[in-house]
Image (spheres, grey):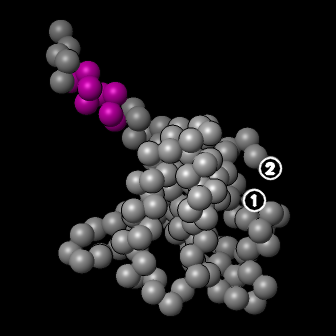
Amino acid sequence: MTTTKELYELIGRIADTWDFGLEDIAKTVVPGWLERHEKILVQDLTRRFFGVDGEEVEVNLYGDGVRAGQTLVVIGEVKARFYGGDVEDFVRKVAKLGKVFKDKTLYKLIFGYWIHPSAEKVCRDTGITPIASYMR
C-alpha cells in the first residue's frame, strides 16, 4: 500500500518531469518568437544558476541576445500555469539577479501553457513579456 508521503513524492517527480519537458519546448519555441516579435536574435537558451550574496538563484531560460546591434540578456521563467503571484516571485528573482547583470539590459519573459489574467497584469506592470505555448 502506498503512503500519502510516497504519493506526494511521486506526484512531485511527475510534475518535475512535466516542467522539464515544457522547458525543452520553451528552448525551441522562444528564440523564434523573440526574433519574429521582438527582433531579438538569441542562439541558445539554457538553464543557469547564479550565485548572489551566498544564495543560488536558478533561471529556467538564460541566453545572450542582440537587438538592433545592442547586446542584451534574456531571462525567463517556465511554468505550466502562471498566476500573478508566480510572476511576482519571478520579479523578486530578477531583482536579485540585478547584482549579477548590473550594466546589462535584461529582457524578461515568462513561458507557460496557460497565463492567468492576474499574471498578465503583473507582467504589464513590471515589463515582463508573457509567452504562452500556443502563441506564434
Q: Would you call the spot at circle 1 few (<14 residues within 10 Å), some (14-19), or many (20 or more)?
A: some
User: In the figure, is residue 98 to the left or right of 108?
Assistant: left
Residue 98 visible to the viewer: yes
Query: How far from the left and from the top, in percent, is residue 17?
Result: 43, 39
Near mark 2 (Cα within 10 A), the count class, few <14, some 14-19 or many ≥20, is: few
Quickly name the residue at label 2. Answer: 136
Tell me which label, 2 or 1, sits earlier in the chain: 1
Q: Does the magenta stretch include residue 86?
A: no
Amino acid at dot 2? Arg
In the image, what residue occupies the spot 18% across and 9% down? 1
Residue at numbered disc 1: 33
The reply, left or right, for residue 31 in relation to residue 111 is: right
- The residue under the point 76% across, 46% down is 135
Vertical comparison of 17 with 26: above or below: above
Q: Quadrant of residue 134?
A: top right
How many marks on residues? 2
Q: Give the range drawn in magenta.
A: 6-13
Amino acid tagged 1:
Trp
Q: Position of residue 15 (x, y in %)?
A: 41, 35
Q: Position of residue 115 (x, y in %)?
A: 61, 41
In the foreground, 10 or 114:
114
CB atoms of marks 2 and 1 within 8 Å: yes
Residue 45, image x, y percentages: 57, 66
Outermost residue, top side: 1
- Can you see residue 28? no
